[in-house]
Image: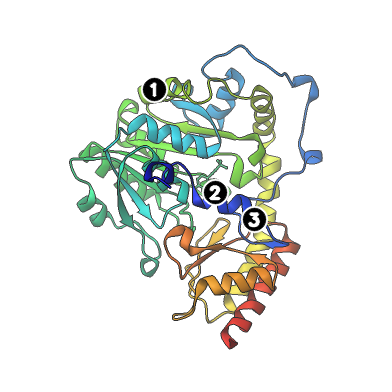
Amino acid sequence: MSSSAGTKRSLYMEWAKTCSHAKYSLATSGLTGVPGDEFPINLDELEITAPGAYGYGPLQQRLAQHTGVPQECIVAAAGTSMANHLAMAAVLDPGDEVLLEQPAYGPLLDVANYLGARVKRLPRRFESRFVVNLDELQRAITTSTRLVVLTNLHNPSGALLSAEMVGAIGKLALRAGVRVLMDEVYLEMLFGKPAPFCFPIGNGIASAKENPFIVTSSLTKVYGLSGLRCGWILAAPELARRMWLLNDLFSATAAHPAERLSVMALDHLEQFRERSRALLAANRALLDSFLDSRCDLECFRPPAGTVVFPRLPHGRDPEAFFKLLREKYETTVVPGSFFEMPRHFRIGIGGDTGTLRAGLERLSAALDAFAKQ
Ligand SMILES: Cc1ncc(COP(=O)(O)O)c(C=O)c1O
């Protein structure tokens, strides 16, 4: 394969679509999907096509309400995936330097490479609970750096960047004249606890026009509404406008029925939030007792979210373990190699509670069997 073809794909997405499925899948990071019969559909409000425009007014209005950000700063996008792509493509030219966290969600890295950026890495270390080290960030930013890319909550570890840390990153970015893309697709999993949403923090330290943060998110992960592809970008108004214009090259107009359904979802978000909160409370208790029972796994435990990223014992072949887990125990997790940390693996706890319980039992059995091999 030529190197250019090699950058026009995401190995992680390919794996997720073709290999992650199993009877007991602990490989997904989102909430199990809301079934059709639980969706508050109003057929009278459904329409197939709308006049083309930069955003569907009622959806823009709901997103403004949801995020607390003016509509001129909001760009609707097909999921956080397209939001991340648009955000990076609007800011980066080939050869521009990007500072991207490591470990990272694969497609973030793939998009940066696809756009021809020069990717430098910012370590978030297991030994330091996956924090961002501000001194290290400051030293890593050079005059060529155009963009810093982070996730909050962090995928794969679930680590939370505090409001103080986000503020400090924003000030540093402002001084250095770089932008920060913050993917917040998991952040609403704090469920009502004060969450460090970075766009308002950015507005607090700069004029709205100079907000150093670009935020991406969607209804996918927290609310189990992936199929709607209801994503958004928050950015300073001039940059937001640039993204709308750029989007004309990618998808021109959105699928209008999905826009209509997204409005219905946002009007009933409390119902979905409660479903997620209750499911994750039950599932986290299962995860905690699993981790308590495994002294062979080292694991940072994040304060919230759907993922943890434990480390397997030294000196064993992780790939052999994942094979055993899949083939004999019908269970999948995400191999750490997709996050450039092959001794780790990611467990997702957003599935239904029965499947999670059985999956964790099987994971335990597989770890026991593997230790004896
Ligand atoms: C950090 C991060 N960003 C974006 C996405 C994709 O989100 P969406 O389904 O909204 O496109 C994922 C999915 O796993 C993710 O982990």
What is the x, y in percent for residue 199?
Answer: 41, 36
Give SS at disc 2: helix
Residue depicted at x 45% and y 54%:
154
Q: Viewed as shown, does residue 27 lie left or right of 107? A: right
Q: Which residue is mark 3?
A: 350
- Badge nearest the viewer, 3 or 1: 1
Q: Which residue is mark 1?
A: 242
Q: Are marks 3 and 1 in contact (CB under 8 Å)?
A: no
Q: Which badge, 2 or 3, is on the more N-terminal residue? A: 2
| Three-letter residue code for mark 3 | Gly
Q: Is mark 1 within 8 Å of ligand 1?
A: no
Give SS at disc 1: helix
Q: Viewed as shown, does residue 281 lie left or right of 210? A: right
Q: Viewed as shown, does residue 278 lie left or right of 235? A: right
Give SS at disc 3: loop
Colour mapping: rainbow
Q: Which badge, 1 or 2, is on the more N-terminal residue? A: 2
Label 3 – label 1 distance at C-alpha: 35 Å
| Three-letter residue code for mark 1 | Arg
Residue that extends furthest to the right in the rendered view of this protein: 37
Residue depicted at x 47% and y 52%:
153
Does residue 21 sit above or below 246 in this rendering? below
| Three-letter residue code for mark 2 | Met
Does residue 318 sit above or below 267 in this rendering? below
Q: Which residue is mark 2?
A: 13
Q: Which badge, 3 or 1, is on the more N-terminal residue? A: 1
Quarter of the image with the C terminus is bottom right
Q: Viewed as shown, does residue 216 lie left or right of 223? A: left
Label 1 – label 2 distance at C-alpha: 27 Å
- Badge nearest the viewer, 1 or 2: 2
